[in-house]
Amino acid sequence: MADCALYLITPPQIELEAFLPQLDAALAAAPGAGVEIACLQLRLKDVPDTEVLAAAKAIRPVLAAHGAALIINDSAELAKKAGADGVHLGQSDGSVKPARALLGDDADIGVTCHDSRHLAMIAAEQGADYVAFGAFFPTSTKETAHRPDPEILTAWSMMTTMPCVAIGGITPQNAKPLIEAGADYLAVSAGIWAHPGGPAKAVEEFGEILRAVGGGA
Ligand SMILES: Cc1ncc(COP(=O)(O)OP(=O)(O)O)c(N)n1
Ligand SMILES: Cc1nc(C(=O)O)sc1CCOP(=O)(O)O
Ligand SMILES: [Mg+2]
């Protein structure tokens, strides 16, 4: 029975007063939908560090109330300052070892690996806790140049127990092949926050497909 959880990612810019209730709604909907929301990645772009830290301070208690972790995007130093549970590193955001030295053994450190098993193996050798493959589908959230085949999720899952995250344009309507291929986490941004029925409805719809594929919590 496949097990697959949601890995939420904020929009690139947020207005806290509006975002916090949306985040709480998504998290609150998860248990009833049979969905595990493992974490939220705070992925603010083109804002000062002070804004990231203020957002992290406001978001952390909302996540804690639902048992979800906070991951900071791009910067291990900022993750440390924010008291976050981990950091996500792209291929140009620094490497795992200094992030591990800064954040410690208990931190969750993830690495972008695009469509490359080789990059994922390097990340694993450096001590990453998860690897992320994508973008599996077109997305307006980020410029992407890679389009892996879901088969990379299966190959990775057969090769190692290290979790793999699928990312890129994921919605309840297109997630099935990624769950079936062995994704341990579905990283989703617009599929949650831009869902026409709102974040709770999006979580419920992910729960339906996760249960249908046998991946629900
Ligand atoms: C879970 C996850 N996977 C991939 C990315 C992309 O990271 P990166 O390549 O560093 O690009 P930016 O997100 O920093 O624009 C991610 N953030 N999270
Ligand atoms: C942040 C990010 N990284 C990607 C990669 O391919 O590495 S795709 C992506 C955007 C994820 O947001 P949405 O769920 O709205 O597509
Ligand atoms: Mg990055």
Image: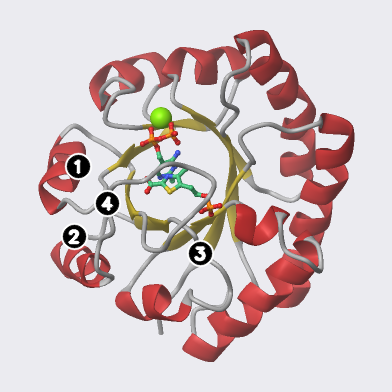
Distance of label 1 from label 4 (alpha carbons): 20 Å
Dot 2 lies on which element? loop
For the point 83% across and 40% down, the residue is: 20
Label 4 crowd bin: few (<14), some (14–19), many (20+), radius 10 Å? some
> Which quarter of the picture shows residue 50?
top right
Q: In which quarter of the image is the N terminus?
A: bottom left
Residue 146, numbered circle: 4
Q: Which of marks 1 and 4 is in front?
A: 4
Q: Residue furthest bottom?
A: 212
For the point 33% across and 32% down, the residue is: 90
Say which amino acid is labelled 1. Ala
- Of marks 1 and 3, which one's residue comes earlier in the chain? 1
Dot 3 lies on which element? loop
- Of marks 2 and 1, which one's residue comes earlier in the chain? 1
Which residue does the numbered mark 3 point to in the structure image? 170
Which residue does the numbered mark 1 point to in the structure image? 124
Dot 1 lies on which element? helix
* In contact (CB < 8 Å): disc 2 and disc 1: yes
Find out if the beta carbon at label 1 lies less than 8 Å from the nearest ligand 1 atom. Answer: no
Find out if the beta carbon at label 3 lies less than 8 Å from the nearest ligand 2 atom. Answer: yes
